């Protein structure tokens, strides 16, 4: 089985969104709805596609600009806290090794208690 080829939106194949234009775009000259074969993508710039529309009834041509947005969920933002590094682990290890107090003294919320 051949591996799935990702959709690259290349010019060699017909974009899937083109079907959405059929039945919705009319010839500016005679008002006839364009058929699927009347629409031909001729260029792309970022999210904008340029589609040449050729009316098969009156022969007039036009260029439609179609904005295509990929339905992609953006990746979540990177966490603002830096990841724990090895140095952090070593620091905690050294802190605990030399620590002789109790847990309250270690994790106390900055209290100024003396013992
Ligand atoms: Zn026409």
Image (cartoon, helix red, strand yellow):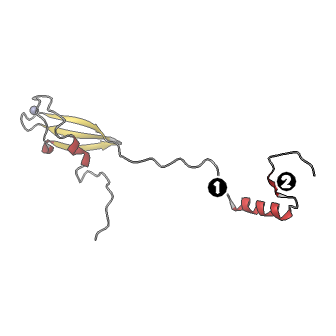
- Residue holding disc 1: 83
- Residue holding disc 2: 105
Q: Residue at x 6, y 36 (%)?
A: 57
Q: From this view, report whether residue 57 is shown above or below residue 73.
A: above
Residue at disc 2, secondary structure:
helix
Q: Quadrant of residue 100?
A: bottom right
Q: Residue at x 85, y 53 (%)?
A: 105
Residue farthest to the right, as pictured: 115
The picture places residue 51, in percent across and down from the top left corner, at 22, 40
Residue farthest to the top, as pictured: 29
Pick whichever of labels 2 and 1 is earlier in the sequence: 1
Number of labels in the image equals 2
Residue at disc 1, secondary structure:
loop
Residue farthest to the bottom, as pictured: 1
Q: Residue at x 73, y 61 (%)?
A: 89
Q: Quadrant of ligand 1?
A: top left
The picture places residue 88, in percent across and down from the top left corner, at 73, 58
Quadrant in the picture for the N terminus: bottom left
Q: Nearer the viewer, mark 2 or mark 1?
A: 2
Q: From this view, report whether residue 85 is shown above or below residue 58.
A: below
Instruction: Judge by depth and name the residue closer to the eye, 99 or 30.
Output: 99
Q: Quadrant of residue 95?
A: bottom right
User: Which mark, by number, is residue 51?
Assistant: none
- Relative to 26, 44 lies left or right: right
């Amino acid at each position: 089985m051949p591996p799935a080829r990702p959709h690259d939106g290349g010019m060699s194949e017909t974009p899937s969104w083109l079907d959405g234009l059929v039945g919705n775009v009319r010839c500016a000259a005679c008002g006839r709805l364009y058929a699927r074969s009347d629409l031909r993508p001729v260029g792309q710039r970022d999210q904008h596609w340029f589609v040449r529309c050729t009316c098969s009834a009156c022969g007039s041509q036009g260029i439609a600009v179609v904005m295509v947005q990929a339905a992609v969920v953006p990746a979540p933002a990177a966490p603002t806290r830096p990841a724990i590094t090895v140095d952090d682990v070593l620091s905690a290890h050294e802190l605990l090794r030399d620590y002789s107090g109790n847990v309250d003294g270690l994790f106390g919320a900055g209290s100024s208690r003396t013992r």
